[in-house]
Image (tube, rainbow, N blue to C red):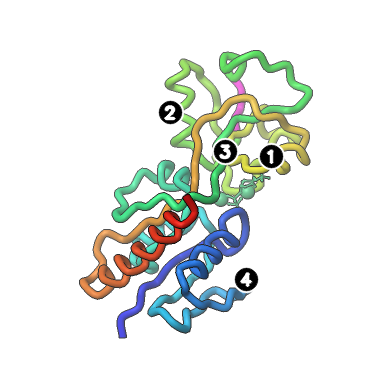
Amino acid sequence: MQKLRIAIQKSGRLHDDSIKLLKECGIDINNGVNKLKTEASNFPLEVFFLRDDDIPQYVEDGVADIGIVGENVVLEKNRPFTAIEKLGFGKCRLSIAVAKTADYKGVQDLQGQRIATSYPVIVEKFLRDNNVQADIHEISGSVEIAPGIGLAEAICDLVSSGSTLFMNGLKEVETVLKSEAILIANGALNEEQQVLLRKLQFRIQAVKKAKN
Ligand code: PRP
Ligand code: ZN
Ligand code: MG
């Protein structure tokens, strides 16, 4: 029988709410955080647990049929995904932060500075829009430690509760964009997969409606 393969975040901000959404959709899965994949017992769904930043690539390559990711990740990768649906959780912002002790007055203070980020495309556009020239250092993780180790004066990363910034002696100074979790789908699903996706989307929409 045809199955739909969904990729969700292995651990982190979106993990729990992604599992919760599937449960609210009446889909039974045993969430083994340390497992790579699991299967639903009452819906033809296979669940892959992956790093959030890698999910768009897996969906584009068709390794997974659909995925739950932050809008920001999709904007950064700038790829055409279909069946995009906002999910109403995982709300956060992509922000610039500097050392708590820095004397920051405005975006012009970023001129000539080094900014560490995992989102170089979005940051470049932000700088261009603000007429600022800065040096973007792309790093794939633990961006928040960059100022402390002398790699950069500023960072641009996701902020949700703010505790990551706080724990690293940083303060948020500019909001670049707002983001939330969205559902993305591979553009070339077969007929049966599309039927399953519509079924799932119908349930997601019902869950969302019940919350409003
Ligand atoms: C983001 C970001 C911070 C954290 C911020 O990580 O990189 O690590 O969330 O959240 P806070 O303000 O609540 O502390 P993400 O969920 O993308 O996971 P990843 O770093 O493993 O990709
Ligand atoms: Zn991430
Ligand atoms: Mg992180």
Extreme left residue here?
191
Amino acid on which disc 2 is placed:
Lys
Please tell me whether mark 4 sits on a helix, a strand or a loop. Answer: loop
Please tell me whether mark 3 sits on a helix, a strand or a loop. Answer: strand
With 81 as the anchor, is 152 left or right in this view? right
Q: Which residue is mark 1?
A: 162
Q: Examine the image and state in which quarter residue 100 appears.
A: top right
Residue 11: x and y in percent read 61, 61
Q: Earlier in the sequence, mark 1 or mark 3?
A: 3
Q: Earlier in the sequence, mark 4 or mark 3?
A: 4
**Residue 117 can be seen in this image:** yes
**Residue 111 can be seen in this image:** no
Dot label at residue 125: 2
Residue 172: x and y in percent read 66, 29
Q: Residue at x 62, y 56 (%)?
A: 12
User: Label 1, label 3: how many angstroms apart (C-alpha)?
Assistant: 16 Å
Q: Is mark 3 within 8 Å of ligand 1?
A: no
Residue 64 is a magenta residue: no
Q: Which residues are magenta?
A: 111-115
Q: Residue at x 47, y 43 (%)?
A: 72
Do labels 4 and 2 touch, CB within 8 Å?
no
Q: Which residue is mark 3?
A: 117
